[in-house]
Image (cartoon, rainbow, N blue to C red):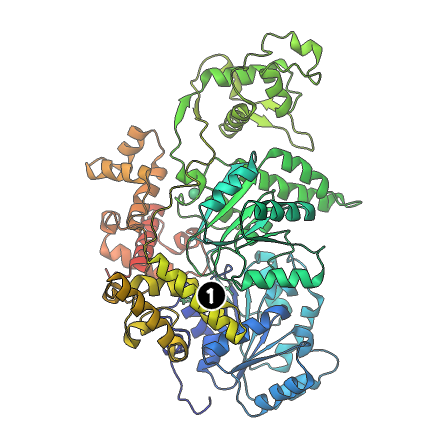
């Protein structure tokens, strides 16, 4: 490779990976590394961390060392690189002595661009290997899953602490550390431990916009799961359960009902586990039911859905598990079945003997998970806030945002609930209060309570309906739950007004839980039958070459083929994921299939419709109804304040509506900022590496408002998504 003249990162991206533009902060990160600097990259799963060291590795002379703790993944990563024509190798215990000495001679001959290693291999007993590395031409050191070095992280690995020796040994080599999870404390620890205190930190947003977050009350969950799966007939997904027994039962039941599912948990024999995992990775089985033991170390990019049958113990776990969906950037769905009973059950699980402090921490995390389940506001906003990030308004892609909530007059309902709580002296939990309201004959209800006037006033509604309204009342601040292991319902400051009939209470109507979740399937914007054929062809190649299908092509690439129907190599070059080597290796076979399909169906190519930049194939307007309503009023000439008043909203909500219309291209950014101001704000946005709006606001003049910043951010999003240049 050393005979090749230096290429630019852009050229490398196109030639080897077949992509035409960088994502997130990839470009800045790559430039920073190429300038010889140390770097720490925080990017969510699927964000594209690998390219941040793979592209520099191809631009620079010499070999880049990649340290990774996941031995199981090394082969896949190296297979994927080789499939793109990039000379690379790994060294770990799975190789034979002969294979290892082969890698050594390639290293000596300067034939490799990337070498993957486990930390103990790099710095094990003695310095032999380090001494060897000093004799060859190194370009850079990349440290993947860098949070493993910190005791503050959730995944500490003692072997990683040895890496502090690297910078001492190679003071002049740039180090790039990468991770998908790291709070501020862990971040500081990483750069300190690695001896790269001056590393520039690049933080990308943790917002996984292609993932839809759905939460549903946990009842009839099996039936609801089946409806959900029926809406995803061809998709691959993971269903998490809390216990090994329920993992097996669920897989069994799904199989009986005709679904293609297999179980995975740490209690299965090793071979069974590996077999099931391989079948899933190789697209030979669609659904895996699993405990959370499953997922670490799998790189499958086309997981289309993740379901949680039971509540995760904390938001970190939930975010990580749901994050396994949609690594290829295509739309994906997650569904959580939530019940307060699960919270109670988990409280037992998170008690740590003789460690009250840690128990308190874990209980708090569990409470936050419960809060997420109860949420009546945008779920994505909650997640982002949890990770210290400002959210750009409501997301429009979670169940709360998607439900066009119907409000009803709930004054009487509220009065009944609150007076029940008062009559019971604020000493009973939600379940008791509901049974009491419904006039339950159960012996659980104390006899003296059965004589109270409020007993049975709510018999006209089901348990579930009461549960729904009480959650709403808590959300609105008319009731509260006490802390502790057995929370009771209590009145609040605001309760009095309701009980005295001074306020009208608006509650959200109970709706069918599946509404908005299982929708009629809209026809996909690409040729579905062709896509299926291309998938089958991909599996053929994968089997022949003994690699997972996504190493050949991602689903995103196949969808582009089935959308733009290229007829020749020039067309293929415009398809994301077709680099030079892949065109050479697979081009003919895939072209032939597309051509044949077009002939049979009387179709012609649509490649001229493909914009130069990556563009989402669907969704013309992403603005949702409520935003469009504000937009309509705005276009009628009302001011933001007038719209807010007319619609009974606060002004910032209306602002968010209007900026979201800018992001979808429904409104011109010029109504918010002049050209000059636009440039000024854009400069600040591009310079700021922390996510969220606050750091941008702080970098600007005081008189520039959040609304103006949001408008520019939204417009930049619009440009990125639709590839427009104005
Ligand atoms: P991470 O390690 O951050 O989880 P990966 O590096 O595995 O993410 O990248 C996720 C997917 O996105 C891969 O399929 C990768 O090829 C793809 N990808 C990365 N960068 C780009 C880009 N600039 N354009 C298109 N696809 C990209
Ligand atoms: Zn939302």
Residue 56 drawn above or below residue 349: below
Give the image quarter of residue 570: bottom left
**Mark 1 highlights which residue?**
48
Using the rendered image of the protein, determine whether residue 374 is visible from the camera's viewpoint: yes
Q: Front-most of 180 and 195?
A: 180
Residue 338 drawn above or below residue 489: below
Q: Front-most of 286 and 403?
A: 286
**Other-residue count near label 1 (Cα within 10 Å), few / some / many at <14 / 14–19 / ≥20:** some
Q: Is residue 480 left or right of residue 21?
A: right
Look at 63% across and 63% down and name the residue there.
Answer: 275
Q: Is residue 600 left or right of residue 276?
A: left
Q: How many marks?
A: 1
Q: Front-most of 302 and 88?
A: 302
Could you say whether the residue bearing mark 1 is in a helix, strand or loop?
loop
Look at 64% across and 68% down and name the residue there.
Answer: 193
Residue 364 drawn above or below residue 498: below
Q: Would the CB of label 1 be found within 8 Å of ligand 1? A: yes
- The picture places residue 571, in percent across and down from the top left corner, at 28, 72
Using the rendered image of the protein, determine whether residue 51 is visible from the camera's viewpoint: no
- The picture places residue 298, in percent across and down from the top left corner, at 57, 63
- The picture places residue 25, in percent across and down from the top left corner, at 42, 65
Q: Is residue 312 left or right of residue 478?
A: right
- The picture places residue 286, in percent across and down from the top left corner, at 52, 55
Q: Quadrant of the C terminus?
A: bottom left
Give the image quarter of residue 149: bottom right
- Residue at the left extreme, as displayed: 636
Q: Front-most of 40 and 542?
A: 542
């Amino acid at each position: 490779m050393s005979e090749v003249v230096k290429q630019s990162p852009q050229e490398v991206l196109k030639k080897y990976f077949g992509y035409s533009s960088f994502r997130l902060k990839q470009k800045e990160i790559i430039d920073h590394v190429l300038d010889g600097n140390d770097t720490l990259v925080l990017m969510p799963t699927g964000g594209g961390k690998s390219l941040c060291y793979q592209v520099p590795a191809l631009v620079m002379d010499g070999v880049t060392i990649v340290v990774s703790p996941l031995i199981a993944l090394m082969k896949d990563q190296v297979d994927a690189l080789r499939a793109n024509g990039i000379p690379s190798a790994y060294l770990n215990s799975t190789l034979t002595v002969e294979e290892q000495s082969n890698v050594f001679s390639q290293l000596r001959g300067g034939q490799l661009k990337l070498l993957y290693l486990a930390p103990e291999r790099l710095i094990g007993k003695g310095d032999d290997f380090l001494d060897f590395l000093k004799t060859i031409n190194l370009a850079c050191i990349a440290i993947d899953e860098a949070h493993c070095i910190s005791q503050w992280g959730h995944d500490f690995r003692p072997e990683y602490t040895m890496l502090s020796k690297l910078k001492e040994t190679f003071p002049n080599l740039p180090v790039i550390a990468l991770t998908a999870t790291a709070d501020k404390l862990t971040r500081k620890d990483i750069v300190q431990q690695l001896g790269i205190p001056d590393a520039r930190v690049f933080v990308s947003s943790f917002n996984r916009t292609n993932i839809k977050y759905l939460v549903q009350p946990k009842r009839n969950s099996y039936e609801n799961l089946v409806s959900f799966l029926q809406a995803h007939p061809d998709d691959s997904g993971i269903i998490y359960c809390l216990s090994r027994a329920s993992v097996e039962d669920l897989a069994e039941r799904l199989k009986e009902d005709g679904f293609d599912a297999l179980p995975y948990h740490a209690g299965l024999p090793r071979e069974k586990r590996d077999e099931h995992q391989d079948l899933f990775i190789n697209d030979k089985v669609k659904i895996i039911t699993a405990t959370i033991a499953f997922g670490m170390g799998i790189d499958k990019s086309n997981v289309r859905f993740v379901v949680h049958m039971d509540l995760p113990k904390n938001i970190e776990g939930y975010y990580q598990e749901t994050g396994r969906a949609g690594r290829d950037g295509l739309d994906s769905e997650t569904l959580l079945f939530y019940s307060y009973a699960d919270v109670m059950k988990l409280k037992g699980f998170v008690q740590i003997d003789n460690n009250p402090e840690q128990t308190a921490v874990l209980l708090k995390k569990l409470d936050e998970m419960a809060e997420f389940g109860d949420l009546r506001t945008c779920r994505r906003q909650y997640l982002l806030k949890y990770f210290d990030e400002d959210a750009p308004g409501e997301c429009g892609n979670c169940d709360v945002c998607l439900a066009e909530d119907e409000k009803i007059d709930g004054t009487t309902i509220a009065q009944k609930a609150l007076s029940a709580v008062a009559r019971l002296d604020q000493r009973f939990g939600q379940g008791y209060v509901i049974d009491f309201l419904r006039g339950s004959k159960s012996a659980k209800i104390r006899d003296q309570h059965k004589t109270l006037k409020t007993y049975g006033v709510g018999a006209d509604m089901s348990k579930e309906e009461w549960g729904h309204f009480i959650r709403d009342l808590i959300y609105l601040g008319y009731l509260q739950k006490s802390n502790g292991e057995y929370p009771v319902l209590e009145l609040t400051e605001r309760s009095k007004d309701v009980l005295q009939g001074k306020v009208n209470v608006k509650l959200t109507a109970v709706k069918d839980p599946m509404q908005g979740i299982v929708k009629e399937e809209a026809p996909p914007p690409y040729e579905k039958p062709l896509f299926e054929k291309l998938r089958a062809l991909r599996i053929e190649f994968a089997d022949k070459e003994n690699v997972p299908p996504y190493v050949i092509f991602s689903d995103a690439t196949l969808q582009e083929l089935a959308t733009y129907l290229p007829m020749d190599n020039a067309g293929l070059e415009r398809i994301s994921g077709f680099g030079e080597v892949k065109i050479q290796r697979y081009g003919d076979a895939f072209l032939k299939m597309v051509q044949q399909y077009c002939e049979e169906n009387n179709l012609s190519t649509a490649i001229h419709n493909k914009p130069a930049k990556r563009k989402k194939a669907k969704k013309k307007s992403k603005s949702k109804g409520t935003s469009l309503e504000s937009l309509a009023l705005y276009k009628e000439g009302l001011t933001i304040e007038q719209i807010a008043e007319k619609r009974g909203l606060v002004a910032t909500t209306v602002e968010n509506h209007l900026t979201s219309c800018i992001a979808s291209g429904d409104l011109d950014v010029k109504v918010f900022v002049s050209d000059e101001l636009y440039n000024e704000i854009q400069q600040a946005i591009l310079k700021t590496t922390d996510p969220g709006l606050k750091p941008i606001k702080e970098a600007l003049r005081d008189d520039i408002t959040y609304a103006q910043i949001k408008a520019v951010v939204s417009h930049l999003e619009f440009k990125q998504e639709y590839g427009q240049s104005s």
